[in-house]
Image (cartoon, rainbow, N blue to C red):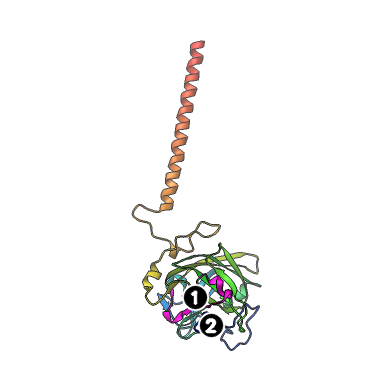
């Protein structure tokens, strides 16, 4: 099983709380970390996806540990670039049939343990504002994936135990994942083909006061050295979110052409049709009433 996915996949699990570990999963986030502005292409180093809660505002952001000092970034400002240094071959092992590719097929793998040549993507619920506002944890939901191939996210124990699939883009959406408060986790991300991927995600939680908060965003990923980063920044997510019919975020919605908003046009056309039908009904009804009155006069 040389030169395979198995060779690079080792420990991390969803934990109730982080514990000291040699893999760098234990961290404490500064409550005063700033939010950086401007576009950023992150292709090496440690980054986490996670919720933030500030002044009653629940958002999903990227915690960028590659910056000095670390910063938070808006997802619309970030492209995660998965270089060809991440290419591994699918193992000849039935345990990895969930990858959906024949053994020996090259795929891009963001590993669970850090590869210095590949962006190290995880998630955390360690924002101090989040930890102060919720008691138990959050639901991290995969709402949809748009790209040239399948995406699978899974965990595997340090002794190469059975893979635990968390998300699989070939399965129905949504795909919820419970994450405890003060958790920091990394998993294996497999991308079947090079190209631009848009991953629609949602973080939902119940605050201490009982209020439900939800944030939806689009994670932009450019897989392969030949994939233009600009294409990832400008790509438009065209799918619907489960149960809402809405797109993931304003950043992922195409601008209307000179004809105006498609939604507004649809509403106006629909409203116009209703008005026309109502007008016809009124005219027909009025004609019938007048005819009935004339008949009554003639019979009298």
Direction from residue 205 to residue 275 in the image, left or right: left
- Structural distance between the alpha carbons of marks 2 and 1: 34 Å
Front residue of this view, candidates 291 and 233: 233
Image coordinates of residue 117 in percent, x first then y, are 45, 84
Label 2 or label 1, whichever comes before in sequence order? 2
Front residue of this view, candidates 173 and 37: 173
> Which residue is denoted by mark 1 in the rendering?
62
Q: Is residue 59 visible?
A: yes
Image coordinates of residue 205 in percent, x first then y, are 61, 68
Image coordinates of residue 250 in percent, x first then y, are 45, 63
Q: Callout 2: helix, strand or loop?
A: loop
Front residue of this view, candidates 57 and 77: 77
- Marks 2 and 1: which is nearer the front? 2
Image coordinates of residue 113 in percent, x first then y, are 54, 83
How many other residues sit within 10 Å of disc 2, few (<14), some (14-19) or many (≥20)?
few
> Which residue is denoted by mark 2 in the rendering?
1
- Give the residue at the far top of this rendering: 300
What residue do we see at 52% from left, 80% from top?
Answer: 5
In this picture, which residue range is highlighted in magenta?
79-100
Front residue of this view, candidates 269 and 240: 240
What residue do we see at 48% from left, 77% from top?
Answer: 104
Direction from residue 221 to residue 28 in the image, left or right: right
Q: Is residue 51 visible?
A: no
How many other residues sit within 10 Å of disc 1, few (<14), some (14-19) or many (≥20)?
many
């Amino acid at each position: 099983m040389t030169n395979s996915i198995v060779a690079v996949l080792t420990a991390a699990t969803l934990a109730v709380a982080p514990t000291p570990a040699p893999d760098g999963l234990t961290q404490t986030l500064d409550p005063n970390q700033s939010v950086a502005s401007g576009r950023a292409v992150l292709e090496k180093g440690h980054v986490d996806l996670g919720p933030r809660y500030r002044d009653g505002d629940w958002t999903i952001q990227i915690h960028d540990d590659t910056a000095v000092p670390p910063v938070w970034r808006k997802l619309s400002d970030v492209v995660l670039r998965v270089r060809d240094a991440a290419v591994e071959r699918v193992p000849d092992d039935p345990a990895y049939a969930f990858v959906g590719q024949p053994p020996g097929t090259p795929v891009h793998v963001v590993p669970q343990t850090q590869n210095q040549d590949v962006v190290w993507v995880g998630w955390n619920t360690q924002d101090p504002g989040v930890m102060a506002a919720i008691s138990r944890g959050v639901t991290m939901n995969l709402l949809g994936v748009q790209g040239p191939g399948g995406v699978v996210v899974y965990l595997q124990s340090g002794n190469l135990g059975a893979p635990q699939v968390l998300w699989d883009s070939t399965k129905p959406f949504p795909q919820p994942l419970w994450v405890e408060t003060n958790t920091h986790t990394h998993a294996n991300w497999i991308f079947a083909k090079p190209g631009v991927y848009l991953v629609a995600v949602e973080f939902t939680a119940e605050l201490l006061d009982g209020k439900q908060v939800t944030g939806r965003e689009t994670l932009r990923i450019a897989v392969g050295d030949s994939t233009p980063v600009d294409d990832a920044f400008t790509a438009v997510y065209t799918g619907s979110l489960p149960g809402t019919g809405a797109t993931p975020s304003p950043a992922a919605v195409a601008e209307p052409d000179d004809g105006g908003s498609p939604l507004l046009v649809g509403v106006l056309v629909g409203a116009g049709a209703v008005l026309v039908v109502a007008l016809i009904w009124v005219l027909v009804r009025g004609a019938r009433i007048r005819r009935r009155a004339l008949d009554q006069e003639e019979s009298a």
